[in-house]
Image (cartoon, grey):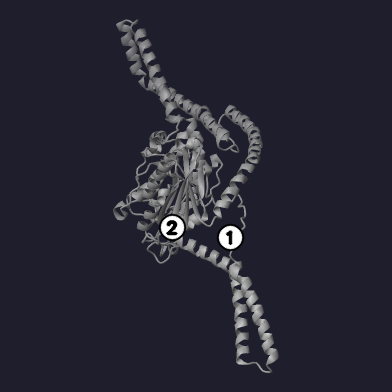
Amino acid sequence: MDSHKKFWLFVLLSACVSVAVVVTLGSLFWSKFTPDEQHQMIELVHRNMVYIVAIIAMFFGGWIVWLDAVLYTYVLPTVQIADETLIILTVNPSHRIKTDASRDMMRLAALINEGADRYEAMARSVEERVKEANEALKFERNILASVIEHLPEAMVICNASGMIVLYNQKAQQTLTVREPLETGRVAETLSGPFLGLGRHIGSVIDPRKIEAAMAEIAENLQAGKEAVSFFSIQGVADQLLNVEMAPIIASQRQIVGYILTCLDVNEAVSLEARRTAMQLFSVFRSDMERLKTSVETLLSVCRAAASQKSDLVLAIESNIAKLDGMIDASLCEYTEFQDVCPITLTSSSRPEFYDFDLFNRPDPGIDLGHQLLTNIVYTVFDTETTGLNPATDEIISIGAVRIVNNKIVQDDLFSMLVDPRREVSEASIRVHGIRPEMLKGQPTIEAVLAHFQRYADNTVLVGHNVAFDMRMFQVKEPVTGIRFTQPVLDTMFLSAILHPAHRYHSIEAISNRLGICIRGRHTALGDAMATAEIFLKFLPLLARMNILTLNDAIEASKKSDYAKVRY
């Protein structure tokens, strides 16, 4: 219940109690008069009824105005200051309180802002020290990640439950599925939709083979044998891949993860052939050089003995020239082959292909409702449409980003335009800037929703005013046959729960409070990124309200006034 309702409910209860007390005291007082005196008083009231009603109305009117002034001058500013102080202490130290209330409230806000200045300076000092302390650890992690990234084999590391913790570029190229859309021109494509941090390894390799390999490894480990499993799969380019799966064993012989190495059989054969040829070339090269020297000596003798070049001499010269060319060409070809390539340590802006903290994540299991909000993988999304009527308007863009381990995975994005197969109004173009010529030739909603469903599989959906987006998906169910059944959270609902004293809960208003910079407002991907940042800022605030699990967040959202809106 928000502050307005609490205040007026308190006023109503106080008024009821006051009326009850007045009625009780009045009855006791009235009983002391004689019937004649009571009759005279009733006649007096009847004669002056208008004045009495006017006085009562003026009293209650003045009382309500006074209470309203108290509400907006003291009560709501107090709640607002408390909420914004919590924001300063938890998610945005740069935030400062601005309030238009009584002099006392403004003085209190000024003192809190002064304390916030000192707190921010101290927090920055601590943050710099922590950053310096983390540099060494970060450097060591980058060494490992850079080495793995440049391995010639595709490598994927997952935790014990099969959640992907690390993968390299070769794995992304070999295992990422990119299905062609039924269109002649696709301006925007998926970025790593089926291989990514926090996804299950079963999304790129047959889950049955993964389960069988895990069972074989556990059996071999228990029997004291080599705990490795081998199997074959088909790559995205129809190549045959040999997969070696080995466990990562911690103390007490506990399996905490698995390493999967995928080797292209054709590349392996070609690589071995090149190595063998290089070894043979190094053996025969010296013999070829000696043979060339002997032939050149014989040729010089023949030239001295003959005044004119015979056919034999010409043939020898021609073969010597060919031999020179073969040696030079072979030398150029095989000196380009190197077993070891230089590795450049990547900077902090490298794609996030690893997150070792995922080793410590619990198996999410089937029941997401009882999982902590910090342990869940989210797909934060937004749509742009031709208008605001789900029954008649169409989706023209979907953008999404994933949150894994409380971090936005910047390289695992979804951004696609949709051909609405209808006109786009100028009013909607002024909002999102997507013109009709940008949509011609793009995939239809049937193809895009199928890809988005696979992108968001096994995650919780998050959006801002997400009821509208979900309704847009729902009206397309008869056409696409696609239904989104996973749990959904709305940052607008959560904002109303966290900051009930604030009147505005738009993306802009929330971002201003939390210190978030919006890039690409009113684009599907830009709004999805802003919503993801808002959601991450909300998590510690929700925890302070004892909203810890997904079920807690869903139940709290149902109590918001926005939950009553229907599309």
Q: Mark 2 or mark 1, which is nearer the start of the sequence?
A: 2
Image spot of residue 330 (x, y percent)? 59, 72
Using the image as rendered, state which of residue 57 and residue 513 is in the foreground: 513
Image spot of residue 406 (x, y percent)? 50, 41
Q: Is residue 176 visible?
A: no
CB under 8 Å between discs 1 and 2: no
Q: Amino acid at mark 2?
A: Leu
Question: How would you rate the neighbour count of disc 2 (Cα within 10 Å): few for under 14, some for 14-19, many for 20 or more?
Answer: many
**Residue 212 horizontal side relative to residue 327, left or right:** left
What residue is at 38 percent from the left and 19 percent from the top?
16
Using the image as rendered, state which of residue 458 and residue 442 is in the foreground: 458
In the image, which disc is placed on residue 339?
1
Question: How would you rate the neighbour count of disc 1 (Cα within 10 Å): few for under 14, some for 14-19, many for 20 or more?
Answer: few
How many angstroms separate mark 1 from mark 2 (CA)?
Answer: 21 Å
In the image, which disc is placed on residue 241?
2
Q: Secondary structure at mark 1?
A: loop
What residue is at 68 percent from the left and 89 percent from the top?
303
For the N terminus, the quadrant is top left
Q: Amino acid at mark 1?
A: Asp
Q: Secondary structure at mark 2?
A: strand
Using the image as rendered, state which of residue 481 and residue 371 is in the foreground: 371
